Image (spheres, grey):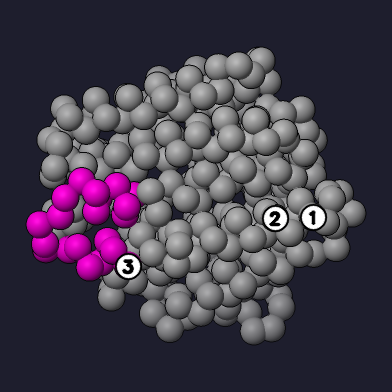
Amino acid sequence: MSKQPASLKEYLKERKKIVDDALDRFLPGEDRFPPLIFESMRYSVFAGGKRLRPVLCMAAAETVGGDIERVVPVACAIELIHTYSLIHDDLPLMDDDDFRRGMPTNHKVFGEGIAVLAGDALLTEAFHLMSDGEILDKVAPEALLKTISEVSTAAGFYGMIGGQVVDLESEGKDADMETLNYIHRHKTEALLTVSIRAGAILTGASETDLAALSAYGRGIGLAFQITDDILDIEGDKELLGKDTGSDKAHNKVTFPALLGLDGSRKRARESIDEALSNIAHFDDKADPLRMIAKFIIERKS
């Protein structure tokens, strides 16, 4: 298993509980009508996972001296967006995966139609959650509006969707580093970076601090995806909770395909070093961000 410090394990455990409790409160239960859609949504939302994006949102808020309670609804909304993307990525017309986090994928349990609708519902609910009156009572309206705009961009055709489109278009083709960087910076990095920016914006970060945290987000985002590419080749299926070799099976362009495994590890380490250098001026309130950065390239799942 990963060698992250015990303090990071405790931090992640505590923050994950905050997120899980809030998500359970925000999402309708299966006693509501029609129950099938709520069962499908909750199945994927509560299927496990580290809650990395909402944790980063809260950690960024803490770094600039903010109250994490102010950002919890937006942090949860970002997790809903992430979960919707996983449901849709797993569909047969996309990556065609049977397992996610050690459990059958949503469409394997509920069928493709309900899986599509569950993803759509999670995406829609994310924006409802970000605009709910509960959060308006805690943050400045202009900060919330800026955050919603940035999350929309990161999740849309200039962000995650755009990256996914180029990823699909590049399958089976010879792609260069420029294309690969575009895919990963949009498909993966965009949502990770906006998670950090959201926490900072909602708690009144200065433009200087926001720029530093954004650079940190870009650094860990790239390293996260490179590590994912590596794990798809040499990761432990049991720890990953899904089959390995998917990238090769789909002829996807990846960092190992272009740089090799050693070159990919080197690029990931460089990216983490760049991320850490950008938050070096923060005090110990940024230590969770520092530990998360190191964890990202040490992780086994």
Residue drawn at point x = 58 percent, y = 46 percent? 195
The secondary structure making up most of the magenta span is: helix
Q: Quadrant of residue 37?
A: bottom right
Q: What residue does disc 2 label?
A: 146
Q: Is 258 on the left or on the right of 205, as rendered?
A: left
Q: Is 144 on the left or on the right of 252, as rendered?
A: right
Q: Is 300 on the left or on the right of 217, as rendered?
A: left
Q: Is residue 129 above or below residue 117?
A: above
Amino acid type, callout 3: Val
How far separated are the C-alphas under marks 3 and 1?
A: 32 Å
Q: Position of residue 292 (x, y in %)?
A: 50, 28
Q: Nearer the viewer, mark 3 or mark 1?
A: 1
Q: Quadrant of residue 153?
A: bottom right
Q: What residue does disc 1 label?
A: 142
Residue drawn at point x = 61 percent, y = 43 percent? 197
Amino acid type, callout 1: Glu
Q: Is residue 280 visible?
A: yes
Camera-side residue: 207 or 293?
207
Q: Answer whether labels 2 and 3 touch (C-beta < 8 Å).
A: no
Q: What residue does disc 3 label?
A: 165
Amino acid type, callout 2: Lys
Mark 2 or mark 3, which has the lower sequence index?
2
Residues shaded magenta: 165-184
Q: Residue furthest front?
A: 207
